[in-house]
């Protein structure tokens, strides 16, 4: 057995544990039982990739490399971004520049993003594979966070997952489609996702803005996820407790299987 096979086996074993927990508790209870959950909604002034290995920032694939210059600039302004990051082995960067040889990609990514940061008047930081919270050669995401708060950062105790900043991103549905494809493809856990161990898309509703209510976010997710049938489950969390008071806790289970959400 090769090293990579072994790493993938470990990731699958861990994935089963995460998914069982999500199935048994639902995302809401999983969030509530985390003592540091308020830390997960601390916001950020850094624009990062939505890669599950990056656990801080306002997320956009490749730190906005797939957005038009105009769209990215607007996102930077709206989110009051002061720092831009790039990272090793960035799939979004590879997608934006398919003709760059694999061995040159990390170096060019660093240089290119440094230039972008300069244009937007931001500081720049490059994250090496060692600084990221995932295996170097594949994606171990069992979830995709569809963040309507604009504040979410994954903390310890929450399942590994891509993050889409629905609150700030002008292309969230497209990003969701892309991350689902990665998670369920060869670069992710792939055929591991099944009816028994589905990929979880977790909507994080805004505490007050109805534009990003749980229902609305889950409707958007459903439009993208419906083609995958029971291999994807749509879950969700109302986040007002984490921003304000825990008294607003509801006992309602907010998880909806794709097949029966309509
Ligand atoms: Zn990336």
Image (spheres, rainbow, N blue to C red):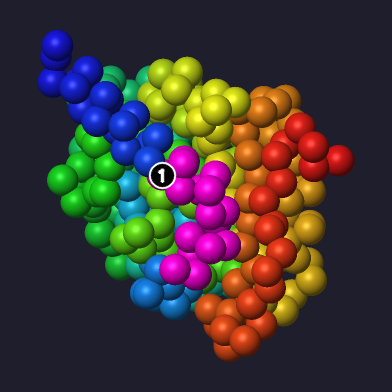
Return the residue nearer the eye: 138 or 244.
Answer: 244
From the viewer's side, name the closer residue of 224 and 192. Answer: 192
Q: Is residue 222 above or below residue 245?
A: above
State which region is magenta: 18-33
- Seen at 32% across and 47% down, the residue is 53
Position of 29 relative to 3 (above/below): below
Q: Quadrant of residue 104?
A: top left
Left or right position of 192 against 26: left
Identify residue for label 1: 18
Image quadrant in which the N terminus is located: top left
Q: Position of residue 151 (x, y in %)?
A: 51, 70
Q: Position of residue 36 (x, y in %)?
A: 37, 74
Query: What element does badge 1 sit on?
Result: helix
Badge 1: residue crowd in 10 Å (few <14, some 14–19, many ≥20): some
The quadrant of the image that shows the C terminus is top right
- Asked if ligand 1 lies within 8 A of label 1, the reply is no
Q: Position of residue 114 (x, y in %)?
A: 30, 53
């Amino acid at each position: 057995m090769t090293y990579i096979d072994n790493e993938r086996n470990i990731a699958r074993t861990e994935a089963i544990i995460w998914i069982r927990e999500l199935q048994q508790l639902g995302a809401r209870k999983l969030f509530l039982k985390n003592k540091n959950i308020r830390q997960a909604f601390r916001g950020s002034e850094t624009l990062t990739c939505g890669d599950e290995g990056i656990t801080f920032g306002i997320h956009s694939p490749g730190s906005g490399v797939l957005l038009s210059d105009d769209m990215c600039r607007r996102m930077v302004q709206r989110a009051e971004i002061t720092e831009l990051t790039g990272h090793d082995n960035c799939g979004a960067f590879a997608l934006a520049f398919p003709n760059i040889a694999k061995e040159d990609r990390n170096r060019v990514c660093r240089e290119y993003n440094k230039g972008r940061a300069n244009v937007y008047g931001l500081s720049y930081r490059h994250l090496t594979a060692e600084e990221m919270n995932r295996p170097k050669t594949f994606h171990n995401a069992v979830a995709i966070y569809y963040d309507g708060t604009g504040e979410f950062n994954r903390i310890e105790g929450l399942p590994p997952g891509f993050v889409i900043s629905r609150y700030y991103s002008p292309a969230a549905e497209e990003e969701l489609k892309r991350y689902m494809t990665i998670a369920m493809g060869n670069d992710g856990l792939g055929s591991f996702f099944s009816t028994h161990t589905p990929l979880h898309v977790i909507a994080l509703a805004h505490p007050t803005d109805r534009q990003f209510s749980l229902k609305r976010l889950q409707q958007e997710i459903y439009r993208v996820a419906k083609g995958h049938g029971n291999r994807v489950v749509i879950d969700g969390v109302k986040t007002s407790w984490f921003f304000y008071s825990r008294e607003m806790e509801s006992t309602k289970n907010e998880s909806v299987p794709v097949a029966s959400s309509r």
